[in-house]
Image (cartoon, coloured by chain):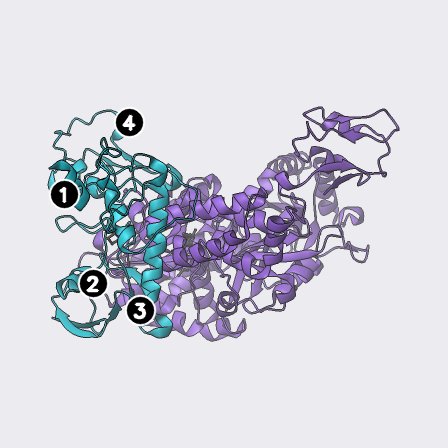
């Protein structure tokens, strides 16, 4: 067993446990986007950062990929961690505002605006679909291509891969490209409806053809009935 | 080439080579690295060979073709040994005369280097200020060796360090020496090499261990690794063999970027020769020590210089970093323990063994040994300079670099490549060592040094590096990919006069988060150009934002081109303008149509009378 301190709590976990698993097990929530229990950790979204080490040498690492070490001191919600998470969420919102999952996370972190030029990219390149396809479906039909700005996910040469069985696993795990709340117009996509007490969806007529898939979402549930 | 079967065989060969060598025979040395070849060294070589043949001088005058000597500004150059006469910027006609002169034992006064400060000619290479102020331990070997002749290397003491290690027989000897030398990695982070090797040596040797030479060198403006490999490939190979002996590594990999064809060629030849001589491969020199090196070509992604990405690239996968731990020393290539070192680090190893760690450690202040910098940008003498650790920036820029080009004032120097920072001129008394550079917000990096003067816009500099980084980020980790893109976006807005004051705070906030949360060294250092320019040149940013003015006259959107009263009406600019935006009669002052002007700057660079103003 490995002994470490999470926030103020002294805990022990089995060797090979990641900081994310350890923290969640002991009840410290850490937001994640590119992590899935059934897949190998990838460390791409950086949302799960935690602060490790002592004052001067303290640094942020992604908890989903960092193994628990003997005597390590972990802080899951220090001001440095929260500040970084907020900035990451702001960047995510600026690039991919239509994702329900990102909206919820942003809302939960109290983000009400983003200060960058608004983009409407769908894919955040978290790689969940690539790992799903490879590790659970044993297909390797899709993969990453290019680097930097030109990085994208797709099949080789953009033609349908022979090994793809159309299982839909990639779509199932995707945090960004599922049908999403658009609040009727994309510019104002951050509705925060799930967190707010006065959900905008209540005005039925106005939002009648809205593609909101919040689950469970108060407002939409009313509408559905 | 006869395979050497024992250590004694090697010593016999070495003695024979030394005995055959006559140091008094004049030798024409022509540096023909990539830089030399680009400025015409190959033609010089052809002329020199033809003249030597024609005049039947082959026995009386030797010709040696070497790698770069460092003074790239003056290439193609010729060095005549043993006198050490230095001829800069040699033309083909002059080459013929130099051959004649060497045959007659004469020095051609009018072709010598002209000292711009004193107006006097200087004969000897070592008296030229550029060379005199350096301490050239690694680079000086480039002069003495023809990189494609292994005998040439052995003649100058090559492979003797390896033999000493083999004779000593104790792997710990190597590690102790390297540790005592205080050598720190020259590839960027400056990790103590001895400690790294000790960690590798301690790993249990089940299925083999790897040593890697990192010759990816992706920093814009840095090329010392290329020159070292081109000029002295055997030095790297010898260093790696010594390292393998000390750490128990079984396999070596040299990872070179494919954009360095000459370096690859020389390495292939060198590896082949070392194999044939029995210095590499199974049972080296008849001992029970085996080590082999193979060459892997990288496709030229900057991020592949990062250790974990480099390992994946060697494995044949996509070059993207992964989280450490586990460190490469624990789990590297194919899961086996791996130690990665920079080209220059490897080149230092034979020097340490040859001279002894104590001697080596005497050089330099705070850090030991010498470091090669590639001095480029707005400076008179561009080239590779090698100085002891701990000299001041000022010494490199003023003494060796010869100060600014023309009269412009030097404003800052950028060290450490795209991940480094800008150091303003008022801090030029800073000693160059790992700690001092980090303290002021820059890094040693691989040793790039880009000099900037008044005509350089710091916003533009930050924007340039961010543009590079946003393209070169592997894109795996969100914050690095988007963070660099967004920083570029903001810088681009500022350079176009569309910035707001709030932008600077946002830029800074974002920069710190990218630094904090990125997975690998690329992202963690990517904000350095932004942060250091913001720290030292904030007023330039504010000038762009508040007054929509670019003080250096670089940012195109913020400047207009004008022709002032100095114009003589020579029509040079009229002819140079691709947009036909300049009009005017002969001998009358011309005018620029600002509607048509694309601000390409062609007129300005051609005008002999300083008549084109940018405001
Ligand atoms: C983005 C990035 C690029 C790098 N590029 C290089 C490079 O081109 N050459 C190099 O030797 N080291 C490079 N490094 C540093 C290496 O990761 C590594 O630290 C170094 O090769 C270790 O060798 P050393 O101990 O001899 O310095 C790079 C690091 C990063 C983060
Ligand atoms: S969940 Fe750890 S980086 Fe995405």
Q: Is residue B70 visible?
A: no
As drawn, the chain in purple is B
**Callout 3: SS:** helix
Q: CB of mark 3 within 8 Å of CB of mark 4?
A: no
Comparing marks 3 and 4, which lies closer to the viewer?
A: 4
Q: Secondary structure at mark 1?
A: helix
Residue at position x 12%, y 38% from top?
A138
In front of the other: label 2 or label 3?
2
Chain of the residue on which disc 2 is drawn = A
Q: Which residue is mark 3?
A: B198
**Element under disc 4:** helix
Q: Are marks 2 and 3 in contact (CB under 8 Å)?
A: no
Find out whether the residues at labels 4 and 2 contact each other: C-beta distance under 8 Å. Answer: no
A6 to the left or right of B168:
left
Mark 3 to mark 1: distance in Å? 37 Å
Question: Alpha-carbon neighbours of circle 1 within 10 Å: few (<14), some, or many (≥20)?
Answer: some
Q: CA distance from mark 1 to mark 2?
A: 22 Å
Q: What residue did someone put label 4 on?
A: A157
Instruction: Say left or right for A132 vs B133.
Output: left
Q: Which mark is residue B508?
A: none
Q: Earlier in the sequence, mark 4 or mark 2?
A: 2
Mark 3, other Cα within 10 Å: few <14 / some 14–19 / many ≥20: some
Q: Look at mark 2 in the image and give the residue it sits on.
A: A19
Q: CA distance from mark 4 to mark 2?
A: 38 Å
**Residue B338 visible in the picture:** yes
Percent of width and height locating residue B565: 85, 38
Question: Label 2, label 3: how many angstroms apart (C-alpha)?
Answer: 29 Å
Label 3: chain? B
Q: Residues within 10 Å of mark 4 (few under 14, many from 20)?
A: few
Q: Colour of chain A?
A: cyan
The answer to whether residue B17 is above or below residue A149 is below
């Amino acid at each position: 067993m490995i002994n470490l301190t999470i926030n103020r709590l002294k805990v022990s976990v089995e060797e090979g446990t990641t900081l994310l698993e350890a923290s969640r097990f002991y009840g410290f929530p850490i937001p994640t986007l590119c992590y899935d229990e059934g897949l190998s950790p990838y460390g791409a979204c950086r949302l799960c950062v935690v602060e490790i080490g002592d004052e001067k040498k303290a640094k942020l690492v992604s908890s989903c990929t960092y193994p628990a070490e003997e005597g390590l001191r972990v802080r899951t919600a220090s001001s440095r961690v929260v500040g970084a998470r907020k900035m990451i969420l702001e960047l995510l919102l600026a690039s991919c505002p239509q994702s329900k999952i990102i909206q919820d996370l942003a809302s939960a972190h109290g983000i009400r605006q983003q200060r960058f030029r608004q983009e409407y990219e769908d894919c955040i390149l978290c790689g969940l679909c690539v790992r799903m396809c490879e590790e659970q479906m044993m297909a390797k039909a899709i993969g990453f291509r290019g680097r930097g700005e030109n990085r994208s996910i797709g099949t080789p040469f953009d033609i349908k891969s022979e090994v793809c069985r159309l299982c839909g696993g990639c779509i199932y795990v995707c945090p960004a490209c599922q049908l999403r709340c658009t609040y009727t117009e994309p510019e104002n996509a951050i509705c925060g409806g799930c967190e707010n007490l006065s959900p905008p969806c209540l005005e039925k007529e106005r939002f009648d053809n809205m593609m909101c898939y919040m689950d469970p979402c108060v407002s939409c549930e009313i509408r559905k009935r | 080439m006869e395979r050497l079967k024992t250590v004694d065989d090697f010593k016999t060969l070495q003695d024979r080579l030394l005995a055959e060598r006559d140091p008094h025979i004049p030798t024409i040395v022509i540096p023909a690295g990539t830089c030399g070849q680009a400025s015409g060294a190959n033609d010089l070589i052809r002329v020199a060979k033809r003249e030597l043949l024609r005049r039947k001088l082959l026995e009386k005058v030797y010709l040696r073709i070497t790698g770069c000597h460092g003074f790239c500004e003056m290439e193609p150059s010729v060095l005549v040994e043993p006198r050490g006469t230095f001829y800069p910027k040699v033309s083909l006609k002059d080459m013929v005369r130099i051959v004649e002169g060497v045959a007659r034992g004469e020095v051609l006064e009018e072709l010598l280097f002209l000292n711009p400060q004193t107006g006097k000619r200087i004969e000897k290479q070592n008296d030229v200020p550029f060379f005199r102020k350096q301490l050239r331990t690694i680079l000086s070997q480039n002069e003495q060796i023809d990189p494609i002749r292994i005998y040439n290397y052995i003649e100058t003491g090559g492979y003797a360090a390896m033999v000493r290690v083999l004779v000593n027989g104790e792997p710990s000897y190597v590690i102790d020496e390297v540790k005592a030398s205080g050598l720190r990695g020259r590839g960027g982070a400056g990790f103590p090499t001895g400690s790294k090797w000790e960690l590798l040596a301690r790993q249990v040797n089940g299925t083999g261990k790897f040593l890697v030479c990192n010759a990816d060198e992706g920093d814009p403006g840095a090329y010392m690794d290329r020159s070292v490999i081109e000029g002295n490939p055997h030095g790297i190979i010898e260093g790696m063999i010594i390292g393998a002996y000390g750490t128990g590594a079984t396999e070596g990999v040299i990872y070179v970027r494919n954009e360095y064809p000459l370096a690859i060629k020389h390495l292939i030849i060198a590896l082949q020769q070392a194999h044939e001589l029995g210095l590499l491969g199974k049972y080296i020199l008849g001992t029970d020590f085996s080590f082999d090196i193979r060459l892997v070509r990288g496709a030229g992604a900057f991020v592949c210089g990062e250790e974990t990405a480099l390992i994946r690239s060697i494995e044949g996968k996509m070059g993207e970093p992964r989280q450490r731990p586990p460190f490469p020393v624990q789990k590297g290539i194919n899961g086996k323990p791996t130690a990665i070192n920079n080209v220059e680090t490897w080149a230092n190893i034979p020097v340490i063994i040859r001279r002894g760690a104590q001697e080596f450690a005497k050089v330099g202040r705070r850090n030991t040994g010498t470091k090669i910098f590639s001095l480029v940008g707005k400076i008179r003498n561009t080239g590779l300079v090698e100085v002891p650790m701990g000299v001041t920036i000022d010494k490199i820029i003023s003494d060796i670099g010869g100060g600014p080009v023309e009269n412009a004032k030097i404003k800052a120097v950028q060290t450490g490549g795209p991940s480094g920072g800008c150091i303003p001129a008022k801090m030029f008394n800073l000693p160059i060592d790992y700690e001092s550079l980090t303290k002021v917000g820059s890094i040693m990096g691989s040793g790039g040094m880009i000099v900037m003067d008044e005509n350089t816009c710091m916003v533009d500099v930050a924007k340039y590096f961010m543009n590079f980084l946003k393209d070169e980020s592997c894109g795996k980790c969100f914050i690095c990919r988007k963070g660099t893109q967004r920083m570029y976006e903001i810088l681009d807005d500022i350079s176009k006069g569309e910035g707001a004051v709030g932008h600077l705070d946002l830029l800074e906030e974002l920069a710190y988060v990218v630094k904090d949360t990125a997975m690998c060294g690329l992202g963690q250092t990517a904000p350095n150009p932004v942060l250091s320019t913001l720290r030292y040149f904030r007023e330039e940013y504010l000038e762009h934002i508040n007054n929509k003015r670019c003080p250096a006259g670089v940012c195109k959107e913020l400047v207009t081109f004008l022709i002032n009263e100095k114009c003589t009406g020579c029509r040079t600019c009229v002819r140079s303008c691709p947009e036909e935006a300049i009009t005017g009669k002969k001998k009358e002052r011309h005018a620029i149509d600002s509607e048509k002007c694309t601000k390409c700057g062609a007129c300005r660079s051609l005008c002999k009378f300083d008549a084109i103003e940018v405001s």
